[in-house]
Image (tube, rainbow, N blue to C red):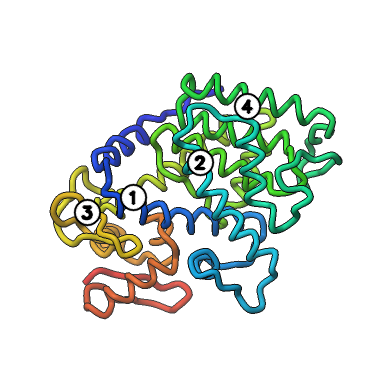
Amino acid sequence: MATINFQECAGYKARIDAYRPLPPETAKSLRAYYKIGLTYSSNALEGNSLTESETKVVIEDGITIGGKPLKDVYEAIGHAKAYDYICDLAKSKALTEADLLRLHELFYTKIDKTHAGVYRAVRVFISGSKHPLPAPEKIPSLMKAFISWFNQQENKIHPVEFAALVHQRFVFIHPFVDGNGRVSRLLMNLALLRAGYTITVIPPVLRNDYIQTLEKAHADTTPFIQFILGRVLETQKELLRLFGEDQFSTNSRGGVNPRVGGVNMGTSGGVKSVKTSLLNILKTHPGMNAPALSKQLAISLRTTQRYLKALSEEKCIVFKGAPKNGGYFAK
C-alpha cells in the first residue's frame, strides 16, 4: 500500500485538543450538533428522503414529516439512538460482539424488529458491485474474527487508517440483512472517537466517489483510506471554524464568539466568525458561487447561503452576473 500522509490531520487534531476539556454544556451541544449531521448524511447516502432540517425536527422534536415515508422517519430515530450508543462505547476498553449487535438493534428495531441485531441467514447482494458477499453460514466466524482484529489492531495502526479499515472490513462482511452501510459508518466514527478525533461526515454529494473508492478497496485499500482521510480533514476544519478559527491562519482568535446549538463555543476571548472566513475567501477568490463556497468551508449550502445573505445586507459583498453562473465579490 502506498504511504499516506497523516501529518495534516495530526496538526488539526492538536489544535482541536488545545480547546479541551470543553465546558459540559458546550460538549453536550457539540454532540447534538453531530448527531443531526451524521444521521442526516448517513441516511441520505442510502436514499433516505429527509432533509437535514427535517431530520432535526424528527430527532429533537419527535414530529413526523408529512408526505415522507414512515421508514425514513424510523431510520432517523434509530440512527440517532445508535449514535448516542457509540458515544457511550467510545469510553469502553474493548469492543464486544454484543456491542455490535446492540448497535444494529438500536438502529433497525423500528424498521424490522425480527432482523434487528441478528446476523443475516440469507444471501444478499450489493447492486453495482461485482464482488460476492460471504455466505450466511460464515458470518458468525467472520464477525468474531472482525471483533478480535478490531481490539488487537486499534492501537497499532494510525487512527484514521484504522477507522477506514474498520468501515471497509465490516461492510465487506455485510453481516445484516440491511443497515450495514450505516453501521459501518457508525463503527468508523466509534474508532475515531476512541482515538480522540471528532465525528466525521460523508456528505451525500460525494456518494459516487465514496462508492467507487470502497469498491476499489477489494484490491487496494489506499484510495478508500485517502478518501476517508479527506473527510476527516474537512470535518476537523469545520470544527475549528465552529471554534472560531480561520483555516487560512494558524492562530486567529479574536472577534465574535460563534455558537453551536445556542452554546458559546469560545474558550478564551472572542473568535472570528464564518462571515470573516467567507470574506477572506472572496478577497482571494472573487466570483465564487454559494455551492463552491459551501464546499470550500465544508458547511451546508443552506448555512452558506444564510451567511451570504447577511453579508449582502451588510453591504460587505455583492453578487454579480446571472443567477446560474454569477458569483459573489467582496466590496
Helix, strand or loop status at disc 4: helix
Q: Which residue is mark 4?
A: 147
Q: Secondary structure at mark 3?
A: loop
Q: Nearer the viewer, mark 1 or mark 2?
A: 1
Q: Residues within 10 Å of mark 2 (few under 14, many from 20)?
A: many
- Amino acid type at mark 2: Asn
Mark 4 and mark 1: span between their CA atoms? 29 Å
The residue indicated by pointer 1 is 27
- Disc nearer the start of the sequence (2/4): 4
Instruction: Residue at 43%, 69% (x, y): give it.
Output: 302
Verify CB contact (< 8 Å) between mark 4 and mark 1.
no
Q: In the image, residue 143 lies at what x, y percent?
A: 70, 29
Secondary structure of the residue carrying numbered label 1? helix
Give the side of residue 118 with respect to residue 235, left or right: right
Residues at marks 2 and 4, CA–CA distance in whole angstroms? 16 Å
Residue pointed to by mark 2: 189
Q: Is residue 279 left or right of residue 190?
A: left
- Amino acid type indicated by mark 1: Ala
Q: Which residue is mark 3?
A: 266
Give whichever of discs 4 and 1 has the lower sequence position. 1
